Structure formats: structure tokens, C-alpha cells
Amino acid sequence: MRLLPTRFPTQLTLLCLVIFLTRLPFLSPGYGNDGDAWRVADAALQMAETGSYTASRLPGYPLYEIVAASIVRFGSFVLNAFSALMGVIAVLFFALTLRKLKCRDTFPATIAFALTPVIYINNVSSMDFMLGLAFGMIALYFTLRGRLLWAGVMLGMAIGSRMTWGAMLLPLLILSLPESGRPDKKQSAFVLITLGVGTLWFIPVWLQYEWGSFWFADMYPPLVYVFYQSTAGFWGSIGIVVLSLLTILRLFRGPTPDWSSLLIDLSTTKGRRLLIASILGIALYLIAFIRLPHDASYLIPALPFVLILLALWFSRRQFLVLCTALSLSPFLLALDNHGVYLPGPIFFDHSERTSQIAYVEAVLDVAEEMNESSLIVAGNWLYKIIGTGRERKWSRSVEFVYLLDSAEAHGYLARGWTIYFLPKQELYNADVYGFSLPELGAIPFPSDSSSN
């Protein structure tokens, strides 16, 4: 018995291939703009060399870190390509999910999902988000198919790549409920398997770092930054403008005769559960983002729920306009704190990536000529410097550190060391440790290159 029409698998396969090919030009240089991607690579190399688990940062991302350790020696391009491959798998299962939900616009919605800027950019860097998204989309599809055992395993794997995927358990649990609405043994098994598999992945973290690894704090960013990350930083300039306009239009004009892209009756139990699960999934990840809004990527797990909800709420025509806007969004009109640029976010990200590598190379060139008793506070540049230095087999004659507390700074100065800081890292150090490096005698790093 055929589950899918003959043409659909062929079309979907071709779409996935094209999406993967669109990633190839952006897989280098380096591991990506996010400093955490370079920390993953550094931890992965340590694991490959020592054979024991090393977290890139706490609370740990063990599944992705362990996978990265197995391939990191092949270089940044291969590790980035792995992210691209996982992204394609996520796209594949999102399309299958839409097909299962009887979406009339599966391919436009799938393309929009794949080309939403936050997805595209993470597809070409060495972060864990695409691995988690792949497992999350497989779990969603299996849940809708009633394959709860495998859904639990897949969601547990997603949790192993990033703990916050655990929030997806509640929406999926709602979607998995039987017609009576009362949980049975299948739902109990689903929860236990999800939590069990997810917990297993964090055993290496606990053994290495104990319970302290699960508690962490970070500074809350400015509200302007939070707003940007949750809007243009996620959807792109074109995407957020069109989404906002369509939302206003829908609120004031109501439904239109071509209602809607998803052929699901919201008056039925299935329709109501899909609506509730989508709203809950969005709410949970929005709350988590508001608590720690450092990166638009933290909202990635909410994206499939947002698109499903909009496919239910927008008219079909409105939804197709949104899909078109999201498909254009990575290629046109990037926005940052310096202005608006005609090339889109993926081109802007790649340009930033290239210029950052060039800056790091310049830093290493200058550092090679410095006195051995020199300490450089590198802040967010540290792991890019370590990774780039390793690739060019640079022998360090000076010391690089992330940040310095007051006691450490006084200790180095007392021993006659000269302390330098890279641009803006004295401000970061002051935010974290509450004292001024320049006032202690630290001086700006003597590089002719400027950083971003």
C-alpha cells in the first residue's frame, strides 16, 4: 500500500538536494560567526585526543559534541557540512509532517522553512541546532503517525543535543493523545523513553562536571538587542515586515474565502489539539527565549509550530505570500546595528565570517612579534584565535585568555607581564568582573586591523 503519491517522493528528494546545494557556497571559512561553534570544535578536538568527554560550554551539548569529536579532524568544512546535512533531514521530515497534516502548500511552506534566515545561517556553521532540529522533526512526524516509541527515542536524541528540546515533549504529548483525551500506556511509555534517552546523553556531563554543570547564569542583554534577535534576527528584514503586515491584515479583515492552507477542521478534536499544541510549543520556547535571549537561534524549535499555526490562521493566499517573503528573506536586505544592506542575511553573515577570520589572522601575525611575557584578553575572540592558530600550526609565544578577574590581573602585572585587550573586550571584562582593565595598566592590542 502506497503512503505517498509517486511524484511526491521524487519532488521532495530533488528539493532536499537543491537545498543542500544552496548551503555549499557558505560552508567556509571557519566554523561560523558564533564563537560557541569554535568552542565546540576546540572541545571536540580535545575529546578526539584524550578519549574523555569535554563540554564546549555548560550545561553541555553531549550528543553533538560527541558527534563533532568523530569528524572534527577532517576540518571545519566537513563539520559545517554535517550541519547542512542535518538541516536537510529536518526539512525532509517537516515536509512529511505537512503532508501528513494535509497541507495544500507543502512545498512552498517547506522552502520557507528551509530558507528562513535563522535556519539557513545555522545550516552552514558548526552549532548543534540543526542536529536537534533534525531529531525534533523526526519526533514530530512519528508522533503524528502514532509511532510513539520511535518519537520518544528521537526526541530524547534531540534533548541530548540541547537540553531545551525537552520543552517539545508537552506539545507532542498533546498530539499523541487518543480520541478519548485520556493518556494511556503509550503516552506513559513515550514520556519515559524521551526522558530516559535524553538523560542517558547527559551522564558524561554529570560524571565530568557533577551537578554544578546544570546551573548557569549569564548577563541579560539590552532590550533593543532582544527585540532584534526575536524579529529581524530570526525572520530577516523582509520576513518580519511581511509577517507583521499580514498579521495586521488578518486581525482586521478576518478570514477570506480561500481559507486555509491546512485542510484541518478546527472544530474537530484533531484540529483543536493541533492548534493547542502549536500555541503551547510557541509559548514554551518564547518564555525560554525571554529568560535568556542571547541568540535568535534559541527560537528555532518554535519555527515549525509557528508555520503550522500560520497555515491554520492565515488565508491560503496570505500564507503563500509569507512563504514567498521568507524564501527571499535570506538573500535581500540584511539589518544590523550599523544599518541596512542590500545583500541579505546569509551574504552578510558570510562577509562577517570572512572578515573575522582575516582579523584573527592579523592578530596572530602581530602576536608572533610580541614579548613572551605578554597576556592578551581575547574575550569572545579566544576560540576563533585558538582554532585559527591550530589550523596554521601557530606556535604561541604569548598567552591568550578569555577574561581576567581582578586577582588574576594583579598577579600578572606583579610578575612583570604586559596585559593587552582586543577591541571592546575591556568593556566585556568590566561587565563580568566589575573593574576596568585600562585603569590597572592594560593597553589596547597593537593591531592595525579593525574588528567588527
Image (cartoon, rainbow, N blue to C red):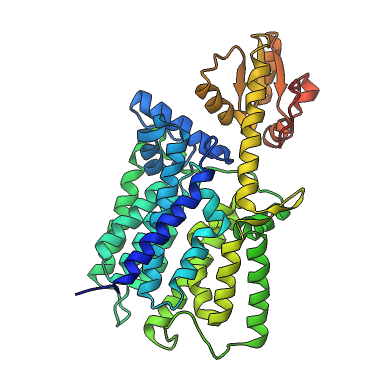
Left or right, 288 with reference to 4: right
Res. 123 in view: no
* Quadrant location of the C terminus in the rendered image: top right
Residue beneath the point at 71% across and 20% down? 420
Residue beneath the point at 34% across and 54% down? 156
Could you say where residue 75 lies in the image, as x and y percent from the top left?
A: 44, 32
Could you say where residue 368 lies in the image, as x and y percent from the top left?
A: 64, 13
In the rendered view, would you say 319 is above or below 208? below
Number of numbered discs present?
A: 0
In the rendered view, would you say 356 is above or below 261? above
Left or right, 445 with reference to 382: right
- Quarter of the image for residue 269 reads bottom left
Could you say where residue 94 lies in the image, as x and y percent from the top left?
A: 41, 64
Residue beneath the point at 30% across and 51% down? 197
Left or right, 434 with reference to 22: right
Residue beneath the point at 43% across and 89% down? 267
- Quarter of the image for residue 181 reads bottom left
